Amino acid sequence: MMTGRAADVRFAFIVPQNVQITDLVLFCDCLQIANHQLGATVFEYDVIQSEDVSAIGGIGSVHDDTRASTKPFDAIVAFGTSSASFDYPPKLLNWLRSQSRHGARVGSIANGAFTLARNGFFKGHSVALPLHAIHAFRENFPNIEIAPDVFVSDNHRFSCAGGVTTIDLAVRLIADRHGFELASSVADRLAYDLKAHRARHTESLIELEIGRADPPTYAALKVMQENVEAPISISSIAMKSGVSIRQLQRRFACLFSTTPTRYYAKIRLWRARSLLQETKLPVIEISQATGFGSHATFSKKYRSEFGKSPSSERILVRNGEPSASIGSMLWSRSVGGNRELAL
């Protein structure tokens, strides 16, 4: 039986009329399973419909008092639709900006990233997307970096690729707030392998990026992958690719919205992360195996990329916990009550 205890975590879900309903159901299921396991309503959510207040699949109930929508939330999740061109009405955008100014974390699931990016919410932040949406997103937002992971958070923003990866986002929040035992139980109830899908997504993204590269850029990417332990200079990579440094820089800026140097570092950091998660090699050996000159440099760059130190990553793996890019960095308070609010 649920207790009357106040919720620890309060979400607001922005749900378009033609929402990808699977994403919404999976997120809600994770929270409801966690609440059931705890015997208390610890995680709550409010459903905010972007067009009207019609009920969605029986989730929540309609509130006539729209003043309730002015209360601050801890995090707001923008769910996606089948259309990347979908946008919010001005009143909802004003409310969302106000919530963000008052400390709410703002993030997206799947194509919800297009709406947030279009309205400036992802400026200076990287974004996790479903693989099929990456080309269109790059075309529309060439200055926003695509994250090579199923979900990502930095500062006050987060994003998720959607589909079953919605579980990653919800489960990692649960793990951060109430430990891995509860989070693992939620994932088990949904028969979800946290690590396996994340690894497949990263591998698919790398294949996607290599597959769309022109011959010189493809050659450069292969050279980078083959020289992780002993990195070579960008000038050497350009020479092996048959182009000048300037030409290589232009190609990476056009295709990946980043520089060859940054992309090369990302390849090495992701290799390091894989070694931390899948092997028992000491951190210092992993640092050396991925071409970082010192442990201090490795730790600094790793923390910048993943929001935690290599040692913290290893501790999480040793304890059997999933990697939580969101973690305490994202959730400083808690988040919103299963209700629908009209704006």
Image (cartoon, rainbow, N blue to C red):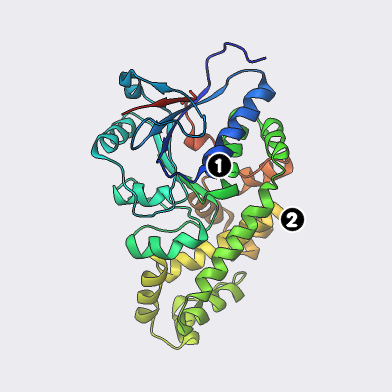
Viewport quadrant of the C terminus? top left
Q: Mark 2 and mark 1 in contact (Cβ < 8 Å)?
A: no
Whether residue 249 sits left or right of residue 153 in the image: it is: left
Residue at the outermost top position = 4
Q: Amino acid at mark 2?
A: Thr
| Inter-mark Cα distance, 1 to 2 | 24 Å
Q: At which x and y percent is residue 282?
A: 71, 53
Quarter of the figure with residue 190: top right
Q: At which x and y percent is residue 289?
A: 65, 64
Q: Which element carries disc 1, helix, strand or loop?
A: helix
Residue at the outermost bottom position = 242
Q: Which residue is found at the position 53% from the left and 21% from the top?
A: 8
Is residue 103 in view from this perspective?
yes
Whether residue 17 sits left or right of residue 67 in the image: it is: right
In the rendered image, which residue does mark 2 sit on? 279
Camera-nearest label, 1 or 2: 1
Q: At which x and y percent is residue 210?
A: 52, 74
Eyeballing the image, is 113 above or below 177?
Answer: below
Quarter of the figure with residue 106: top left
Q: Amino acid at mark 1?
A: Leu
Numbered label attached to residue 169? 1
Q: Residues within 10 Å of mark 2 (few under 14, many from 20)?
A: few
Quarter of the figure with residue 246: bottom left
Viewport quadrant of the N terminus? top right
Eyeballing the image, is 24 above or below 70?
Answer: below
Q: Which element carries disc 2, helix, strand or loop?
A: loop
Q: Which residue is found at the position 50% from the left and 70% from the top?
A: 209
Q: Which residue is found at the position 28% from the left and 38% from the top?
A: 93
Whether residue 302 sits left or right of residue 190 in the image: it is: left
Whether residue 197 sits left or right of residue 260 in the image: it is: right
Q: Reading the chain from its start, which is encountered first: label 1 or label 2?
A: 1
Count numbered badges in the picture: 2
